Image: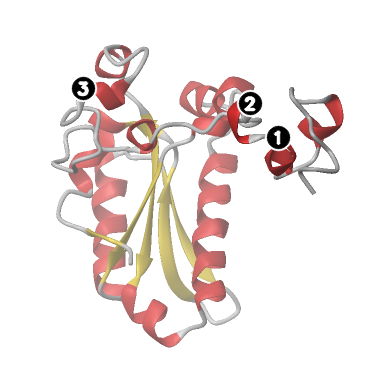
Amino acid sequence: MRTLLPLRLPSPVAATLPGATFLLPALTRVSLRGTPSRASMSVDTSSSAPDSAAANPAAAGEGGGREAAVDVLVQYVVLRRDLADAWPLGSVVAQGCHAAVAAVWAHRDHPDIAAYCAPGNLDSMHKVTLEVKGETQLKNLAEKLEAAGVRHKLWIEQPENIPTCIATAPGPKSQVSSFFKKLKLCK
């Protein structure tokens, strides 16, 4: 097909077709969609991951110092491991989605939510999905968040009345991360 369509530069048609870079010769191939670096996707810049901006200054790219000065807004979603082992994956994911949307909607007038959902930030939202062992740990976490005044939603699946997950309203990482330090990433 390259011999039939020898394009030297990206055409307007090629730019509108997903995966159309195969139409371009190897020497003039350009990325039609900018892909963020893996380091910019990391929520925890203090982690020891080899691809984090802290461990790899070259991966920080432009604006590398800016992330350190700004307290990133993050939303935590905590799922129950026992349900993830017993329910279909889609059902568990749906529970997390319900809780995340409910937490945002319930606090939609808060300035942190406005900043998190601003048009310029929609493609760079930060979420951390964690897990607890079961219902008891989930309820204990909900009580701790409530006592500390952390905005969140404990999602209770109806009509079964089963607490399935917690989602925080997006907030500054420095203010909410301490409640989640001991939890494992959901896998």
Question: Counting other residues with Cα less than 10 Å from the Cα at mark 2, is it few (<14), some (14-19), or many (20 or more)?
Answer: few
Residue at the extreme bottom of the image, as rendered = 86
Q: Amino acid at mark 3?
A: Pro
- The relative height of residue 21 versus residue 144 in the rendered view (above or below) is above
Residue sitting nearer the eye, 120 or 118: 120
The C terminus - image quarter: bottom left
Question: Counting other residues with Cα less than 10 Å from the Cα at mark 3, is it few (<14), some (14-19), or many (20 or more)?
Answer: few
Q: Quadrant of residue 175?
A: top left
Q: Nearer the viewer, mark 1 or mark 3?
A: 1
- The relative height of residue 106 versus residue 141 in the rendered view (above or below) is above
Q: Which mark is residue 57?
A: 3
Relative to 175, is 114 on the left or the right? Answer: right
In this figure, which residue is indicated by the disc labeled 1?
Answer: 24
The CA span between labels 1 and 2 is 6 Å
Q: Quadrant of residue 130?
A: bottom left
Residue sitting nearer the eye, 129 or 67: 67
Residue sitting nearer the eye, 21 or 142: 21
Report x, y in % for residue 142: 31, 56
Of callouts 2 and 3, which one flags the residue occurring earlier in the amino acid sequence? Answer: 2
Q: Which mark is residue 28?
A: 2
Report x, y in % for residue 109: 57, 27
Q: Which mark is residue 73?
A: none
Q: Which residue is at 58% across, 75% downward?
A: 158
The CA span between labels 2 and 3 is 29 Å
Q: Amino acid at mark 1?
A: Leu
Report x, y in % for residue 146: 31, 48
Q: Which residue is at 32% across, 74% downward?
A: 81
SS at mark 2 in the image: helix
Q: Amino acid at mark 2?
A: Thr
Relative to 71, is 118 on the left or the right? Answer: right
SS at mark 1 in the image: loop
